[in-house]
Amino acid sequence: MKFTLSWLKEHLDTDSSLENISETLTRIGLEVEGIEDKAAALAPFVVAHVLTAEQHPNADRLRVCTVDAGDGQPVQVVCGAPNARAGMKTVFAPPGTYVPGLDKTLAVGNIRGVESLGMLCSGAELGLGEDSSGILDLPADAPTGQAYALYAGLDDPVIEINLTPNRPDCTSIHGIARDLSAAGIGVLKREPMPPVRGEGECPVPVALDFEPLDKGLCPYFALRLVRGVKNGPSPDWMQARLRAIGLRPINALVDITNYLTFDRGRPLHVFDAAKVKGALTVRRARDGESLKALDGKTYALDDGIVVIADENGPESIGGIIGGEASGCDDGTVDVIIESALWDSANIAQSGRRLGIITDARYRFERGVDPVFALPGLDLATRMVVEICGGTPSEAVIAGDLPETERVIDFPWTETRRLAGIELSRAEMKVTLETLGFHVAGSGERVKVLTPSWRPDVEGKADLVEEIIRIAGLDRIEPKPLTRGDAAIAKATLTPLQKRTRLAKRALATRGLVEAVTWSFIPHDDAVLFGGGKADLALANPIAADLSDMRPSLVPGLLRAAQRNADRGYGDVALFEVGQCFETDQPEGQSIRATAIRRGTARHEGAGRHWAGAAATVDAFEAKADALALLTALGVPTGGLQIVAGGPGWLHPGRSGTMQFGPKNQIGYFGEIHPRVMKALDLKGTLVAFEITLDTIPLPKYRPTKVKPALALSDFQPISRDFAFVVGRDVAAGDVVKAAQAAERKLIAGIDVFDIYEGTGIPEGAKSVAIAVRLQPVERTLTDTEIEAVTAKIVAEVARKTGATLRG
């Protein structure tokens, strides 16, 4: 939002400096992004009088000029402009001046043997336009020596503020002045705006053609005909202000509507009455209709877009842009001025769908003051009559103004309770009333009526925000948090938040690189990974291939790994911790930790090595990552069950499911299914795991987090190897669990070091070899005790798996 200082002062009676105004704007929430002060930039440029202009002795296209810059000492300047002549007034820049159009600083020059002590400037060299055909030719009465910025009216600073979406009232300069007035910068000027008394009825009827449920698309529409206008250029003061904020003046009728859009935050539209056929109808567009808009582009319309139409069809896209066919030009004699209210959500959706960005859309999608619709029409009518002449008719109104009154029961103590600052009732009341709120009551609680231009104020907290915003956050006294000696600070992070942080750290320590992928993926990818439901399809995707909320983190990481491989970095290991979606309900969302490895990106290192051939990743790499993550999260893996197989996106024979009992599956690991590899056009070897952090059982409550004392045995550990012959369908993990259960106090660890099938092993069986490590605690074990433990291990494994010792 841009405006000039003089424009602001038309609404605000103030003597405050530009610096003070800028600081106050930022302090009250209207952050100043920049100030363009052309007077400062153009300070060295002055109005000069060319005394003589002689032909350059050594160049046909150059002239040697004598210039009076106002100090009584003529200087010599070499000029190449074809219009340079004796007696003219122009703009002079002395040596040492920075010329913005040339992006350089002038120095004393020697041009073809003649000294030049400065420069005579064109508008393009001053950065004021694109015309560089000649130097500026000023009127003869231009005062010699005066700063050109002051003479040309360029000494009006332009302020740009950054508006948040919840402040539609400050899309107008009047609204900004109101806020500054409340902050004590000045007094808001409140000019009376009596209604316009028209002559005769308006001959152009208007109808709102909507179904009952669609009336909110345009609840109110007002228009008026003005006969006998004379269109042409708008006044110089209006053109100067529009140019200052980056708008191009077009003609008086259009410039008035643009001016009021910024001055009062009231977008309007003008139609050439001679180009409108019959009555105007506000309705949904029909499929197949189109409109050539004022920007010269033709837009295809559908029933989601609201238009203003006549008997010829759509003449304007309501609240966004007008049509070229009914636009005003120099031949316009009778003009229709419209002022309407539009549905904010529909304007935003229509503007995004059509790709149209206008000042009208910017305001309507945030919300304009509904009560100002008719006064805005009257204000525009008065300006048209003053500038262009003409006779206005009575206004035609269709629809009704929506109810905007909202009364809030407000206790003054709420400010202290929510903001921690003590303000007097008088100060708080003055602040609210200056901002336009009506305060009724004199006790501890008052009734506050919100103004029609503040749709963002809905409750007590919003009123506190307004009071504190104007009072200043710097008035909140900083105080340390007090805590009793016996109090213990409670944890601020939930268990899930802690797991999320720990998971990222644990996976990074295993050489995996964190990735952040889109939360939405192509529909076909979602279907491959168990998603693709209608309730998870985006209503307004940012791209055609990002249409569905992701059911898994795996597809995004797979795509990222392939993009790396396509660029020559195939050995990639990535992880991500983020949200996945099974339904569109809150309980259908979950936090998952996922990692993938590709090529030779194993935990011990990727790529080739002189000591041997590079080994590609396999399902056990993914399993190791998953188990390492669970260990880092403090999850006891003793009760973890690993079942062969997994979801459809994993290879059925090279994958596993991790679970704590059959009803609590916490994740999967394994190699990506060839069918998925083909569908996603993936190449190479890819393995992955995915764990749902929400489903991991919470640890048991402990009164203290102090770790137990480290207990190290003084006795030598003993290792014994066992080779069991079991059925081929018996998992090695079952053998390990059975052996572990035989003697939990002495067995410190079990490792599987060999699995064999072939000669010497019966058909349908296999040999599983394990190394059992025994750790004595109280004393050294005797041979008899060791043999007893060995016998218990063999017996327990045989009982639970049907195994026999291999001979």
Image (cartoon, grey):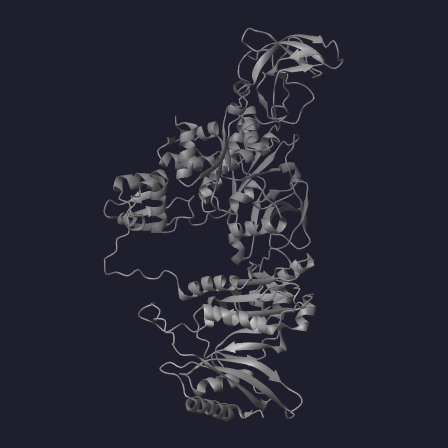
Q: Is residue 466 left or right of residue 482?
A: right
Above or below — where is 550 with respect to 258? below
Front-lying residue, 494 or 212: 494
Tell me if I can see residue 253 in this picture: yes
User: Which residue extends farthest right?
Assistant: 60
Q: Is residue 484 left or right of residue 152?
A: left
Above or below — where is 682 with respect to 395? below
Q: In this view, does 666 lie to the left or right of 542?
A: left
- Percent across and percent down for residue 594 are 54, 66
Front-lying residue, 37 or 272: 37
Above or below — where is 377 with respect to 788? above
Residue at horizontal 55 percent and vertical 92 percent from the top:
805
The quadrant in which the C terminus is found is: bottom right
Tell me if I can see residue 343 in this picture: no
Give residue 116's quadrant in the image.
Answer: top right
Residue at horizontal 55 percent and vertical 49 percent from the top:
347
Front-lying residue, 472 or 710: 710
- Percent across and percent down for residue 44 are 54, 19
- Percent across and percent down for residue 171 are 48, 40
Give residue 478's quadrant in the image.
Answer: top left
Front-lying residue, 593 or 349: 593
- Percent across and percent down for residue 198 are 51, 34
